[in-house]
Amino acid sequence: MGYFLSYYTYISFGCWVQNMLAAIIMLIFICFCVHFQNTAGQFFSSGHTNNWAVLVCTSRFWFNYRHVANTLSVYRSVKRLGIPDSHIVLMLADDMACNHRNPKPATVFSHRNMELNVYGDDVEVDYRGYEVTVENFLRVLTGRLPPSTPRSKRLLSDDRSNILIYLTGHGGNGFLKFQDSEEISNVELADAFEQMWQKRRYNELLFIIDTCQGASMYERFYSPNIMALASSQVGEDSLSHQPDLAIGVHLMDRYTFYLLEFLEDIHPASKSNMNDLFKVCPKSQCVSTPGHRTDLFLRDPGSVLITDFFGSVRKVEITMEAIHLTDPILQLEDGPMSEEVQEKTYSYVDQLPVSEIIHQKPKQKDWHPPDGFILGLWTLILLVFFKTYGIKHLKHIF
């Protein structure tokens, strides 16, 4: 009897092992199928196929020259890296290039001694002057614009769009001023981004703000796939940089100045990632403490390339549908090809002249005195006069 029980137990154990092996094999097969399906889905339907940029300067008046230069510097960089004007919404609250105080009309410089003109010859401003309002900015983000609004003033993004939003101006704890007459709060901005997410208007969003207490503007964000950077923490000022005596104002803010220097080293094939961007302006250079927020972003910042937001992607999707060309393709007649044709090889040229645009800076065309030159010249003249005639002849000057 014991022998039969042992044999029965052995048979039962063997069946159980076979069933477990079958279940494990089936589970592995199912996991493989799911993984293959996800991989194929990512290949045929990429989540990021286009880039957009919304660049906003919210300040008016000549003494805010640097805020216009900030925005145009970022505009110049994203265009250089491949984002076309059709995918850029540029909002400038004042026209510094045509300001009567500008000693060099039709120019906006971001470096002293007028080394780099960021206005250029092909700037397309979509919203200018009093068009730059909180209402228009929110309408651009959410897509709630009148039907008569031209395409150039619309953010025609979708759920495959990576969007860069850059803001600069004067702000405080939880708000950003628009033209010294109104302001947008961090709550309003957070709700606008949530509307964009619910309406599937972006895939990933990079928010950069250069203003005093800039970090307070991203504290209320709650929508997914948002990465935010700010030039200063709550309670800190964002300081200006590059004073120019010939123009009479500061040319840029510190954070955007070092951001522009960083972007000048980026090219369309660059492998720099967001962790490199976080180190752009340390406190030793910015004086303020730059901040960033990544808890809402689903990907690791180290795996996010700078060109995912500042560049333009060109991804190809495979389709099984037949494409009929309008014009028939003329086939060459079969015949022996000459040796010159056979030896000649063809290759594709770069869509962007990468070798020419890297480190490209306009040359200084017109010389003007460096800082302190005029003051030093007058000091030298007065010293020579006092040495020659003395103080008693000072009355002849006045």
Image: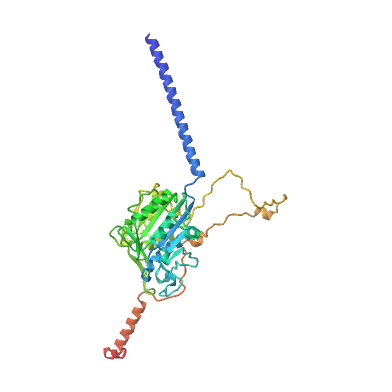
How many marks the image carries: the answer is 0
What is the quadrant of the C terminus in the image?
Answer: bottom left
Q: Position of residue 137 (x, y in %)?
A: 41, 59
The residue under the point 34% across, 56% down is: 186
- Near-viewer residue (163 or 81): 163
Q: Position of residue 323 (x, y in %)?
A: 61, 47
How was the colour assigned to the protein in this rendering? rainbow
Q: Residue furthest top?
A: 1
- Near-viewer residue (223 or 9): 223
Q: Quadrant of residue 136?
A: bottom left
Whether 267 is drawn above or below 244: the answer is above
Q: Is residue 284 visible from the viewing direction of this image?
A: yes
Q: Is residue 84 visible from the viewing direction of this image?
A: no
What is the quadrant of the N terminus in the image?
Answer: top left
Q: Position of residue 7 (x, y in %)?
A: 41, 13
Q: Position of residue 319 (x, y in %)?
A: 56, 45
Whether 242 is drawn above or below 272: the answer is below
The residue under the point 44% across, 23% down is: 19
Q: Residue furthest left?
A: 392
Q: Quadrant of residue 21?
A: top left
Whether 30 is drawn above or below 203: the answer is above
